[in-house]
Amino acid sequence: MTTEEVHEDRADALFHALADRTRRDILRRVLVGEHSVSALARGYDMSFAAVQKHVAVLERAGLVSKRRSGREALASGEVEALRSVASMLSELEAVWRGRIGRIDDLLAGLHDATNDQRGRQDPEERQHTHQEKE
Amino acid sequence: MTTEEVHEDRADALFHALADRTRRDILRRVLVGEHSVSALARGYDMSFAAVQKHVAVLERAGLVSKRRSGREALASGEVEALRSVASMLSELEAVWRGRIGRIDDLLAGLHDATNDQRGRQDPEERQHTHQEKE
DNA sequence: ACAACCTACAACCGTTAGGTTGTAGATTGT
DNA sequence: ACAATCTACAACCTAACGGTTGTAGGTTGT
């Protein structure tokens, strides 16, 4: 599996995890502070198991981490994962600006330089640069 | 339907549209410049109809707009929709910073002040502020 | 006129997602 | 010891998703 595929897998997991309002709501709560799964479950009109699954999806995506404390599992939000999603969007916007031609370059500024938007604004001379493959 | 529900519907559509690698790839292409649907379809190992559906999903989410030119439908990426997604993530990060307590406040800075991150960085004194509802 | 092309959409199919209930194990408080 | 609580997971159900093929209508070029 190439590095780029891993990146796409992560993107799939992250965007999918965010594509559900219950999960986004759970994420908001655990970003404020730790909550046990059952404490979270009390806030929604669905079964405990359903909420637990949502937390599991968030956890698999890396948006939430869990810690054991006795019988409860305390979940808290991972703001760095959130920032990595933001950086994916920045990459897309960079494509729009015409800065990135090949997808390979997307993995260049991946470590910590997430919010790299010093520089030009609104080029507007973008027009079908159009390199068809094959 | 409340304003907040509309907002959540939009978030659902946007994140769901982005949660598929083929759609993200299509989006990258049309962010560079206009492409007809069949031109896009030629780039993927799937049927025309499948690609057309992907474009439709992106269009419904507002990430892509289509224009008719004769027999072809030219799709181009909507960078503003991309920025609105980024602003949703900023709102979540603002929740983490402890700035936003109630979800209602999320709709405050929604018009154009998307990248509102002048101000404090990394508070770190966040710890279970924890207001349980009910 | 007609063939080629592009788009749109319906119908279908297998898999995944989001929900349910039930069961079982570990921890806690009395 | 025992009941209550919390978590994890399996099994199941229905709806939505991502793909297919087929059909039909509008545009283009010869």
Image: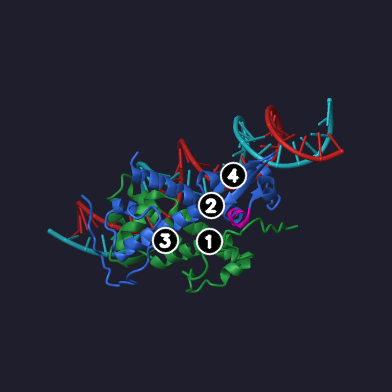
Chain colours: A green, B blue, C cyan, D red
The residue identified by callout 3 is A59
Query: In the image, what residue type sits under mark 2?
Result: Glu
Q: Disc 2 to disc 4, how far (Cα)?
A: 10 Å
Q: Residue furthest bottom?
A: A112
Report the chain holding disc 3.
A
Q: Is residue D26 left or right of residue D12?
A: right
Residue B50: percent from left, percent from top: 63, 44
What stretch of residues is rendered in magenta?
B27-33
Residue A1 shows in the view: no
Whole-angstrom CA distance, mark 2 to mark 1, is: 13 Å
Callout 4 and callout 3 share a chain: no
Which residue is tagged 1?
Answer: A122
| Disc 4 from disc 1: Cα separation | 21 Å
Chain to which mark 4 belongs: B
Who's the residue at 24% across and 63% down the image?
A: B129
For the residue labelled by badge 2, is the local secondary structure a helix, a strand or a loop? Answer: loop
Q: Residue at x 53, y 52 (%)?
A: B78
Q: Which of the 4 image quarters holds residue B67?
A: top right
Q: To which chain does the residue with label 1 belong?
A: A
Q: Amino acid under label 1?
A: Asp
Percent position of residue B98, x then y: 28, 64
Residue at image position (31%, 58%) is A29
State the separation of the CA atoms marked 3 and 1: 37 Å
Give the Cα separation between the discs numbered 2 and 3: 31 Å
Relative to residue A94, is residue B123 drawn left or right? left
- Above or below for B62 versus D30: below
Mark found first going from the N terminus, 3 or 1 = 3
| Disc 4 versus disc 1: nearer the observer | 1
Which disc number belongs to residue B78?
Answer: 2
